[in-house]
Amino acid sequence: MGKNTEEAISFLESKGFDVAIQDSVYTDTARMGIVLKQSPDPNSTVKVNRTIYITVNRKTLPLVDMPALEGKTLNFALYILGRSHLALGDTLFKPDFMKGSVLEQRFRGDRIGPGTKIPWGSRIDLVVGKGLDGELIPVPDLVGLTYADARVLLDSSGVGISLVVDPDVKDTANAFIYKQVPPKLNENKQPVFMQPGQIIDLWISVEQKLPVDSIP
């Protein structure tokens, strides 16, 4: 055990034994291509021509599945990486409402999806939300969007919503926004900014209406 596989086979055959590779496994605690285990055990008394079975450490890295880390807390993502025989690469922090959660998982610079086969021991870069404390968020133009689409834009920013619903609306998700306060631009046509936790007021209707400020 501990010898290079070819060297071990040559040695055993020179002593009159047949050799069979019983299993090829991988461990990162031993050199690639060496004998990890043999049967019968070393120093056992055996007859010449007996077959010696060996277990060897693979010469190439096995492939493992990339786990799903996005949306998990950083600590839990690190635990999953370890269980998946992967390592943490760079940790990049990005302003986002999901403070402490993994926003993206990347391998060799590119975003990687769960289930993708990658080599054992690969380093995975994580983009992690750092919160929005003190961050100013540009107010988006929501007029003309459905309420459901607006929620997608606003939910990740930490901005709250106050809804004014026209009497004829039965399905708020598919109703259209025709007015918002604050607007995207102020009276000087400059962008308006908000902080996380502030409220944006939205007016919704069954029909797409002209923006309130465009009505003569």
Image: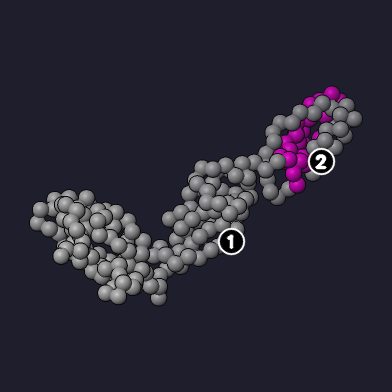
Report which residue position mark 2 lands on.
4
Q: Is residue 70 magenta?
A: no
Q: Residue at x 52, y 51 (%)?
A: 111
Q: Nearer the viewer, residue 59 or 137?
A: 137
Q: SS at mark 1?
A: strand
Q: Nearer the viewer, residue 92 or 45?
A: 92
Q: Residue at x 79, y 26 (%)?
A: 51
Whichever of labels 2 and 1 marks the residue nearer the N terminus, that label is 2
Q: Quadrant of residue 55?
A: top right
Image spot of residue 214 (x, y percent)? 20, 64
Q: SS at mark 2?
A: loop
* Above/below status of 200 relative to 44: below
Q: Nearer the viewer, residue 73 or 195?
A: 195
Amino acid at pointer 2 = Asn
* Above/below status of 181 relative to 148: below
Classify 10 Å Cα crowding around label 1: few (below 14), some (14-19), many (20 and above).
few
Q: Residue at x 24, y 56 (%)?
A: 144
The stretch in magenta equals 31-59
